[in-house]
Image (cartoon, helix red, strand yellow):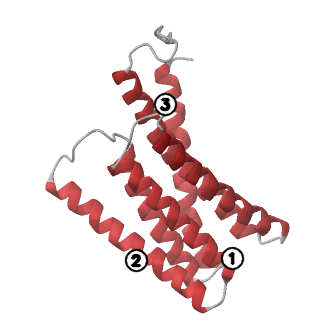
Amino acid sequence: MTIATRQWLFNGFKVSVYTLLVINIFLYLRHGTLNEALDSLGWVLLLGVFEWETRALAAPYVSGFEKAALWVLQIIGYGLAINAARVYFISAEWLDFANAVLWLLVCATIIYDVFVPGEFGTHEWRVRNAVKIGLYVALGGIAVWWGLTSDWLDFYDALLWILCFFVIELNIFKHEVELEHAHHPGGAGGAPQPQD
């Protein structure tokens, strides 16, 4: 399989899961609560910003408009997500509240990746990734609980979000590997890796 084919398949995968997330908003409007739908909308906006920011981490903003638009989308997205977490807390929906807080912490780690990328393979890089793994494991545990208690919409939603943020993590990892190869051509073994 060529690099171009793999990239085409990966882009198709991203479009598919992102489309499912947009459909998710409407599922929550129909089968959930308004707060859940707004929560989902906020996260879709944030995911869009993360996709935009991580697709080309080293590239500067094209214009002031691009930077301003991304900030506005983030403000709206975080506003909706934090408000949803507040409603979950007030309503004593503890699992939904824990899920929301964990996702906000995942966002904090991704923001750190975007603005303070660090160096691939260092102690700081390992600690940062261990924290992220712990957060994703906790989120996976919540998803499994929803599945075991037959809360199918929340189970489906949780798995879909984990999958979508996996795409963002792949964008970050790809950038880290590119930086590592730029700083240390030939990789760890000293020999260039063959390309398809």
Q: Answer whether residue 190 is visible to the viewer in this image.
A: yes
Q: Nearer the viewer, mark 2 or mark 1?
A: 1
In this rendering, position of residue 125 left or right of residue 88 = left
- Percent coordinates x, y for residue 148 in the rendering: 84, 66
Q: Which residue is mark 1?
A: 95
**Residue 159 shows which numbered tag?**
none
Q: Is residue 141 left or right of residue 149?
A: left
Q: Quadrant of residue 143?
A: bottom right
Residue 119 relative to residue 195: left or right: left
Q: Mark 3 or 1, which is nearer the eye?
A: 1
Q: Earlier in the sequence, mark 3 or mark 1?
A: 3
Residue identifier under label 3: 8
Picture layout, residue 105 above or below residue 1: below
Q: Which sits in the foreground, 42 or 15?
A: 42
Q: Earlier in the sequence, mark 2 or mark 3?
A: 3
Q: Name the amino acid, label 3.
A: Trp
Residue 108 on image: x %, y %:
44, 61
Q: Nearer the viewer, residue 196 or 99?
A: 99
Residue at 55 percent across and 82 percent down: it is: 35
Q: Quadrant of residue 20?
A: bottom right
Q: Return the residue at label 2.
A: 79
Q: Residue furthest bottom?
A: 90
Dot 2 falls on a residue whose secondary structure is helix
Instruction: Return the x and y of residue 186 as percentages of the image width and height.
Output: 43, 13
Residue type at numbered disc 1: Leu
Q: Does the CB distance between marks 2 and 3 fall below 8 Å?
A: no
Q: Amino acid at mark 2?
A: Gly
Question: Please, what secondary structure does the residue beneath circle 3 have?
Answer: helix
Q: CA distance from mark 2 to mark 3?
A: 34 Å
